């Protein structure tokens, strides 16, 4: 009698490796095409503050009008030379012979000023115009090389706007190499400790590298097409965010895969179940971060606005790689990925989370034993830290304070301030009508902090008449303070106040650009923070189908952020000795901490809700914390370590963001998610799910074998109810 058994299922099982293999092949192609763009992002990035401001900013409008009064688009490099005991004729001759041949060559303006000795005779300065059409940083490097062989005892530095741009470029140059090397090394080391396997960490790292390649390719293309404005800080945050997020998502999937391998002998079925269980929390996490960072699109500052889509693209790439490449690789590797500690097939213990997570079961038991005491204690601890948050200084810093360590442009600016009017070479410009020119000139000269002011004249020395363009004139004012300082910004505020009653009068220039950037950052911070809170709350309500739980999660995350700011204030104002922080520092820290900090609560509470549907809120929280404790803690440590890697870039802004995010993530992971949220949930009980059905009827299946086994193994105080 012929065999009538349907043979069709067998080929399906036999060829289940095909789809994972095709996914791996697809990602190899994607990586080969997009990977090289990670090293090319710097070529399309701009670090010029003037490009960050909106067109409506006063200094931007002045910048546009100045084109009618200037023949070229040049910025000054200021060469400052100092000799203790006095500048000699040989010193002046060296400065002239070293710089004069550069005039008119590629990257340089048509003329270089002669050296100007200081009144005390111990210093000299000269101005070298640098074209913005090419690569100003490369041109400044040529200038510095020309001045490298200074006479013995003569200290020479290149400062001014061009010198600062060159030093910023050098600082950001470490993003492509050093930052990636440090971040990758940190991730590998942590994953080896977590997994105790030489294989799995590299699989996870490859997933993150593919994600970075995809994100870099998309950002490069959009920047090249003029859709995005990329700068060094956005580039650095993109690299770190992709590494951190991709690794976090990978940890969650790998942890669930390991659980499933214990309960099933089929590696393909295990990865399918693990993927289904993690796609919702990982998708919700990625969606929360994307929604949070896209709130930056509401910013008036272009540098903030551009970070939103750049970071969002990074999260999308991380999600795609973690949910497609990684499961495909795990499906093919199976238990071999965990070698030498391969998970054994033990279905009898798979239902008992306590059997596989003993440490976190003990922690969950202790939280459940006295939840009120634990949430009260952690709340007091966080409130103590938050009490110092008002002392965090984020009203802006001088441009010369952007750098960590010794930088030539900063040291040169200090020398210039000692011997000259510090604002020379970087004037503040006032645009007004020809009819009001005398009146405005008098007001500007009478403003405290202004060393001198004159109407801008033509390039022909034989014609002393001021330039008039469309009935307007320009006034160039030299400030007594360094153009990059906060004191100079205060002088610009005073000038604007003095000429405020004169119609059609605008104040701009380098210092005004810094001032407008600072004030726009403050506006963005006050606008965006409340919007981020609202957006994240709405997402949590939709995800958890509750109002109480999202309110608790959001409130605890905000408290964690406040405590982080308070601790940072103590360190920044004290042992670190920082002069302050840019207004955008707390904004960036808030956006990333709220979005990323909520991630861990999403990972926890989605698992708790899953367990609550079967076992009730109390046991659901205990089982959820037990199951997710290890993976979420590992994810938090990885993310904190990768953000801390930003500190290798010698810029104050990135160091402060790195510290705030790294410290805040650890607070969220180790205190808020481990102690505060579980204790509050246990104390509030099923009402935490209000107004969903879980709040009215706590579903239980404690007569099931898995639940009974878990309860029987729990301490007596956990078995009640």
Image: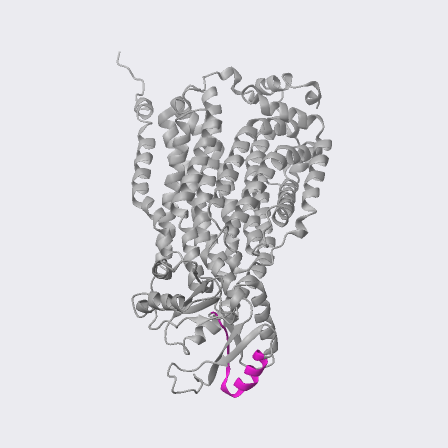
Report the front residue among 103 and 131.
103
Place residue 703 in its image quadrant: top right
Residue 440 lies in the magenta stretch: yes
Please tell me which residue is depicted at 43% across the width and 44% down the height of the picture: 179
Locate the C terminus and report the quarter of the image it occupies: top right
Residue drawn at 41 percent across, 33 percent down: 204
**Looking at the image, is 677 positioned above or below residue 447?**
above
Residue found at the far left of this picture: 2
- Pick the residue in front: 368 or 614: 368
Tell me the residue at 43%/35% (across/down): 185
Q: Is residue 612 magenta?
A: no
Q: Is residue 133 visible?
A: no
Left or right of 46: which side holds 3? left
How many numbered callouts? 0
- Give residue 408's position: percent from left, percent from top: 45, 57
Left or right: 617 as drawn, with respect to 106: right
Q: State the colouring used for the structure image.
A: one colour
Residue 149 image point, x, y percent = 36, 58
Q: Position of residue 148 (x, y in %)?
A: 37, 58
Q: Position of residue 508 (x, y in %)?
A: 51, 72
Image position of 48 with respect to 191: above or below = below
Q: Which residues are magenta?
A: 426-445
Q: Quadrant of the N terminus?
A: top left
Along the line of sight, which residue is nearer the eye, 506 or 545?
506
- Is residue 416 visible to the viewer in this orientation of the structure? yes
Q: Main secondary structure of the magenta part?
A: helix
């Amino acid at each position: 009698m012929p065999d009538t058994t349907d043979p069709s299922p067998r080929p399906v099982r036999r060829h289940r490796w095909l789809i994972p293999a095709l996914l791996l092949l697809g990602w190899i192609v994607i990586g080969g095409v997009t990977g090289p763009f990670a090293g090319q992002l710097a070529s399309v990035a701009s670090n010029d503050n003037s490009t960050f401001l909106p067109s409506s900013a006063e200094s931007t409008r002045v910048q546009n009008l100045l084109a009618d009064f200037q023949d070229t688009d040049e910025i000054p490099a200021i060469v400052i030379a100092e000799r203790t005991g006095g500048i000699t004729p040989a010193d002046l001759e060296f400065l002239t012979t070293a710089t004069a041949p550069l005039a008119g060559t590629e990257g340089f303006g048509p003329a270089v000023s002669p050296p100007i000795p200081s009144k005390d005779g111990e210093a000299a300065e000269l101005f070298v115009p640098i074209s913005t059409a090419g690569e100003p940083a490369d041109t400044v490097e040529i200038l510095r090389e020309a001045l490298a062989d200074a006479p013995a005892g003569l200290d020479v530095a290149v400062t001014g706007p061009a010198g600062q741009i060159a030093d910023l470029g050098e600082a950001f140059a470490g993003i492509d190499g050093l930052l990636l090397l440090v971040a990758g090394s940190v991730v590998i080391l942590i994953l080896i400790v977590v997994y105790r396997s030489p294989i799995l960490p590299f699989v996870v790292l490859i997933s993150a590298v593919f994600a970075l390649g995809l994100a870099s390719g998309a950002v490069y293309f959009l920047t090249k097409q003029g859709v995005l404005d990329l700068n060094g800080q956005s580039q650095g945050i993109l690299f770190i965010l992709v590494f951190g997020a991709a690794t976090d998502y990978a940890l969650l999937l790998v942890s669930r895969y390991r659980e499933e391998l214990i309960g099933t002998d089929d590696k393909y079925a295990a990865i399918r179940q693990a993927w289904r269980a993690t796609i919702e929390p990982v998708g919700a996490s990625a969606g929360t971060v994307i929604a949070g960072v896209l709130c930056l699109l509401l910013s008036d500052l272009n540098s903030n606005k551009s970070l939103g889509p750049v970071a969002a693209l990074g999260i999308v790439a991380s999600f795609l790689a973690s949910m497609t490449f990684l499961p495909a690789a795990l499906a093919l590797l199976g238990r071999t990925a965990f070698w030498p500690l391969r998970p054994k097939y033990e279905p009898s213990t798979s239902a008992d989370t306590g059997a596989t997570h003993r440490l976190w079961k003990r922690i969950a038991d202790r939280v459940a034993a006295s939840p009120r005491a634990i949430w009260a204690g952690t709340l007091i601890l966080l409130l103590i830290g938050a009490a110092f948050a008002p002392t965090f200084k984020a009203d802006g810093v001088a441009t010369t304070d952007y750098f960590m360590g010794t930088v030539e442009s900063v040291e040169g600016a200090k020398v210039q301030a000692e011997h000259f009017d510090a604002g020379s070479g970087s004037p503040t410009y006032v645009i007004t009508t020809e009819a009001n020119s005398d009146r405005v000139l008098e007001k500007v000269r009478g403003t405290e902090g202004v060393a001198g002011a004159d109407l801008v004249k033509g390039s022909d020395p034989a014609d002393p008449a001021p330039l008039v363009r469309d009935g307007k004139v320009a006034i160039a004012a030299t400030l007594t303070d360094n153009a990059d300082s906060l004191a100079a910004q205060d002088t610009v505020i005073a000038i604007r106040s003095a000429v405020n009653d004169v119609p059609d009068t605008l104040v701009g220039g380098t210092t005004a650009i810094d001032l407008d950037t600072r004030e726009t950052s403050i506006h963005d911070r006050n606008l965006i923070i409340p919007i981020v809170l609202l957006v994240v709350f709405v997402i949590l309500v939709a995800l958890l189908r509750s109002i109480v739980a999202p309110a608790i999660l959001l409130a605890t995350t905000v408290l964690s952020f406040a405590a982080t700011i308070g601790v940072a204030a103590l360190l920044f104002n004290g042992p670190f000795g920082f002069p302050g922080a840019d207004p955008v520092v707390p904004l960036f820290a808030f956006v990333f901490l709220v979005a990323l900090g909520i991630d861990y609560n999403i990972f926890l509470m989605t698992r708790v809700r899953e367990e609550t549907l079967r076992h009730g809120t109390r046991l659901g929280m205990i089982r959820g914390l037990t199951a997710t404790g290890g993976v979420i803690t590992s994810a938090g440590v990885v993310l904190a370590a990768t953000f801390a890697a930003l500190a290798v870039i010698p810029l104050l802004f990135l160091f402060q963001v790195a510290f705030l995010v790294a410290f805040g993530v650890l607070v969220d992971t180790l205190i808020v998610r481990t102690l505060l949220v579980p204790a509050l949930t246990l104390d509030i009980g099923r009402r935490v799910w209000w107004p969903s059905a879980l709040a009215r009827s706590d579903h239980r299946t404690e007569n099931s074998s898995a639940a009974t086994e878990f309860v029987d193994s729990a301490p007596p105080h956990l078995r009640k109810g």
